[in-house]
Image (tube, rainbow, N blue to C red):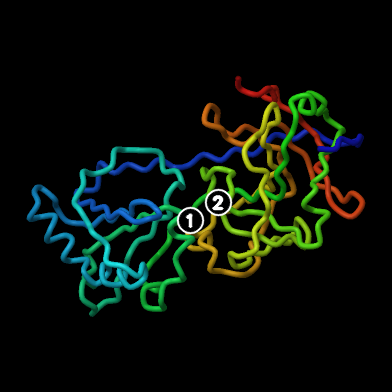
Amino acid sequence: MTLTTITGVAIVRPATAAAPARDTAGLTGAWFEAPTSGGPVRLYASGTARHASDAAVALARCDALLDALDAWFGAALDWRWIAAPASVTATASHARAHWRPEPGTKGGKKELACRLELPWALLRTLPAPDTALAQQLHWLDVPVVLAIAQLRVGEEELALLEPGGAVVLPESMQRNWIGTLRALDEPARAGAGVPVSLPSPWSPRRIKAGARAETGGEAAGNRVLCEVRLAIPHAVGGDRLAGWYEGDLGEVGPRAGLWRCATERAPAACLATGELMPLGDGWALALQELYEIRQTVQ
């Protein structure tokens, strides 16, 4: 990491993103789970589930969806009835979609409600669903992170950070600057998220999975894995994080932050905020405000 001096910048506060609560206690239907090589897939079917025969009826009402999923996954899924998940905070650890069959199709009654939940890693190994299934799946929006650079930073370098300084973004000096868009709670590890092309920080564009940014990997020795994140003020549909789509990402905020990536012992933490500025053939983060949580967890 390179530090330079920049003066005359204003103080700002980092944006905070709180995920809404998700409570499954009010859902009286049946929950099912099917194992896959990419992790378990969960399905909720409305109705009542007092005993196994209720659950069997609820699952049978979704057989049009089950057939479509088998074709999409390329294998027959082995569903089993499970207890309703406990009330949890609605993190984006799974992509979620409501299934709304077309009226007149089997299972197309208005009172039928099905919800599909599958791991991001699994979703990104699948091809885009066929047209019929794609029209019936309505993906929930999720808060996202746009990581435009990753750095391995020594503890002594973290101690040198100060308002008026800058952090140079090495990736921005490459011919093809590629960032990573991922769900808010996904870890900053190789393979997480989908690639985003950055002709400039203000015009991020989704590109199909294939070209990916090289990540810094795990922290080594006394070096801390950090990343520079650009603010995304809007949520993104879950299917837009699958790697099937190309196109502009939409509005991005003017601020960026230097974040320490999450570890097994500590969550991700914002170390500093500021604004991006051109520097030579690339870009740098002009530091405006620092936070006292720069020390690493021992």
Q: Is residue 128 above or below residue 35?
A: below
Q: Nearer the viewer, residue 219 or 114?
A: 219
Query: For the point 70% across and 25% down, which residue is it?
Result: 294
Residue 290 horizontal/vertical position (percent)? 75, 28
Q: Quadrant of residue 66?
A: bottom left
Image point 92% across, 51% down: which residue? Answer: 280
Could you tell me the amino acid type at mark 1?
A: Asp
Q: Nearer the viewer, residue 283 or 256?
A: 283
- Residue with the mark numbered 1: 141
Residue at the limit of the structure toward the front, as seen here:
221
Sequence-first tag of 1 and 2:
1
Q: Give how far across and how far down residue 191 sits, in percent.
A: 56, 53
On the rendered structure, is 198 left or right of 110? right
CA gap between label 1 and label 2 equals 18 Å
Q: Amino acid at mark 2?
A: Ala
Q: Helix, strand or loop at disc 2?
A: loop
Percent from the top left, x then y, of residue 282? Answer: 85, 53
Figure quadrant of the C terminus: top right
Q: Is residue 86 left or right of residue 94?
A: left
Labelled disc at residue 192: 2
Q: Is residue 91 left or right of residue 243?
A: left
Element under label 1?
A: strand
